[in-house]
Amino acid sequence: MPGPASEPIDHPLLRNLNAPQREAVRHAHGPLLILAGAGSGKTTVITRRIAWLIEEEGVHPGSILAMTFTNKAAEEMRERVQRLVSVPAAQMWVSTFHSFCTRILRREGERTPVGRDFVIFDPADQKSLVKQVLAELKLPEKQFHPKKVLEIISDFKNRCLLPEEAREEGLDPWTRKVLDAYDLYQQGLKNHRACDFDDLLLWTERLFRDPVVQSIYGERFKFILVDEYQDTNRAQYLLVQHLARRHHNLCVVGDEDQSIYGWRGADIRNILDFQQDFPEAVRIELLQNYRSTEKILDAASQVISNNSQRVEGKGALKTDLGVGESIQFKLSDEGRLESEWVVQRIQELRFLDHEAKVAVLYRANWQSRQMEEALRAQNLAYRLVGGVKFYERQEVKDLISYLRLISNPFDLVSFRRCVNAPSRGVGPTTLGKIEGAIPEGGTPLEGLALLLRSGELKGRAQRELGKFLDLFHRAATEREAQRLAGLVKWVLQESGYLQSLEDEATLEAEGRIRNLEEFLSAAAESESLGLRLSEFLDRITLAADTDQLEEASQLSLMTIHCAKGLEFPYVFVIGMEEDVFPNRNARETSDGLEEERRLFYVAITRAQRRLTLSAARRRRIMGTEMLSMPSRFLRELPDAALAAPIRWGTELYQAGEGVRPGSSFARGAGGASVATELQRIRSFFDRVKESPSAPAQEREGGRSSEPAEPRDPTAFEAGTRVRSARFGAGTILAASGRGDGLTYTVRFDQGGDKRIMARFGGLERT
């Protein structure tokens, strides 16, 4: 290969590249680590590198394997390479990991237990199979929820562990029973000649353990390139290692500072340890940012420097786009006012620039509700990216159907929706019988009562529908006795809907619970405006009817996870509060807190021209107004990048600034007085001031230097033995939140790990 100095910079494949980018494109042989900072043009480097290997190094296109994580990214990469060099698409191996594995298994499947002609089970197929398995093992779904069992099975598969191998780990009794289900589930897949998505990785990795197969494909793919390497899990890591073992021509591209998918199996150690795996590797850092201004990048660099899980000696991002505007921070009195303030700023931007592209980012989907309402109030079109609009979410529509049926017993559509939410064993046949029993001019509930009296319903359907009917009989009294938020909370509790999600204990269920909590907060807000149930239902129905206005908007709402890889001239990050961002669960461990900080880094680096952060002094949680503490990440921002220094004192929280005596907040969180809450915040800030801006986990000793959070005095400590009427004896692993939001993670002796909300769990110390 000619030396670097002999290649002209004006070569078409090197044109308009900076020096590190040119070096990365032209590096041909041996392992290469490209640390591609945010906005550094990594896609350009990747595609030109592939084109360089083909055009200048004479590598056959079929000898290059490029893998990424989404079909969109793979398609873009393939198209850009084809524009650079004339290569038939059929010769190129540019795909996602799962597509690559499917292609290999279709060729070599006879060497695996699944064969070549397997079908791929989608999530619905998987759930159906695992429910059959649980029934065969006589494992109750309330203790072994199918989605939770599938989460555990997926985790084992992503770590390349089959049931017999997983049994070698020290496991609790509940997980050992899940392994029995895993074993039977795999047998079921084999009987169906099927794979699930995790199997595609698992069986391909197993296949490449065979020295013969490894030699064949190791020789075929002489050059391997992996994009977003920081997002690889254990199975993907081993797969790449097998393929690269022969030639060592492995190029990985990624940024450990943007590793934000640990919750779904991504292992940041894969990129951190790359130079240990390949000591001869060349490391190239792409630090020239082509997206953002200096103040935005300085803030991002300062924040991420507090993490310890970083590549040693890595440089900071730089830009030639100028100093730019200072970062704005707004602390509003409460969440609704925060949303209204953001909308006002957006309107001002639109007045100055009609084509302004704006993104509002938030940590979790439930936060979109107040923003959506504030935007609709001003008739501003928006697009919700990567999610369903708040009032269209399944759990929200299920809850609304209960409230509509309470308000209007003749509402057959709402009856059909809520009668089996949560599941009560009501299928089309039973539903048809109920509707057939409705008397002339009567209600669905009257039809159900008549059918129950007839004795035609048996077993579970009879028991569950009897409870369902009783709920609506009592609802008439509750509607008179309860105010709006109290009625919503009563329905959530008495219907069993919230309990069913808590029993599920999956990440998906946790997000749905937060959406229901936010709906309760919406009810509390409407209650404070004097709205009755029917008026509240009218309000949210009219809000949903405006959704058709939202498609062609230049204003986008999305979670930060959805925003990764995107960029916008104007970015708002809302909800910068403890327990919101960082998330109340993730911040319980140093690893979780570091991933939250990486998520904030991703949020900051989405902004091109202007970044605005916001928080609220008070926020409704489960309908109760609570004092919020500003996110610790705000404290890590450099003053030089801010429009005005953030005041770190409890003067921001004095009762005179929005805390009204006699309001629902007057007793604070969990019944605490305002004075107690202010003292809690004062103690927090005292610790913050005393704590140095050091990495959250010290390099020596591994101790967290983050200040300990004040604990709810009513909370059980970690390690406490407790008993639940439903799940039996267990041990408290962790507690998060306060008051109505207080939630325990409990490891039950016979039921595995579950998240239990204190207000419903009925836990007793043993």
Image (tube, helix red, strand yellow):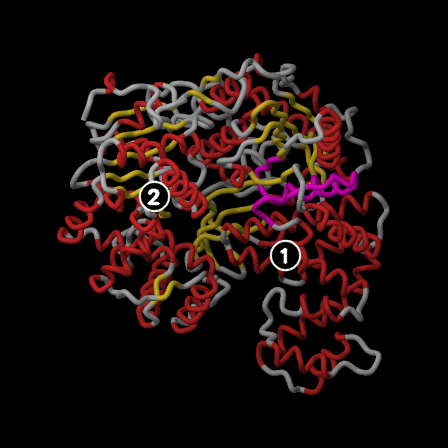
Q: Is residue 539 above or below residue 61?
A: below
Q: Position of residue 189 (x, y in %)?
A: 34, 67
Residue nearer the viewer, 221 or 293 = 221
Residue 464 placement: quadrant:
bottom right
Farthest-out residue, right: 530
Q: Secondary structure at mark 2?
A: strand
User: Would you say 284 lies left or right of 624 here?
Assistant: left
Residue 453 placement: quadrant:
bottom right
Q: Position of residue 518 (x, y in %)?
A: 67, 46
Magenta part of the chain:
360-387
Please say whether residue 465 is visible from this viewpoint.
Answer: yes
Quadrant location of the N terminus in the rendered image: top left
Please count the marks in the image.
2
**What mark, if any, has residue 423 been given in the picture?**
none
Residue nearer the viewer, 272 or 219 = 219
Q: Secondary structure at mark 1?
A: helix
User: Would you say 45 lies left or right of 350 here?
Assistant: left
Residue position for label 1 = 395
Amino acid type indicated by mark 1: Glu
Residue position for label 2 = 67
User: Would you say 90 lies left or right of 416 here?
Assistant: left
Q: Position of residue 379 (x, y in %)?
A: 78, 41
Report the mark closest to the observer, 2 or 1. Answer: 2
* In magenta segment, residue 314: no
Amino acid type indicated by mark 2: Met
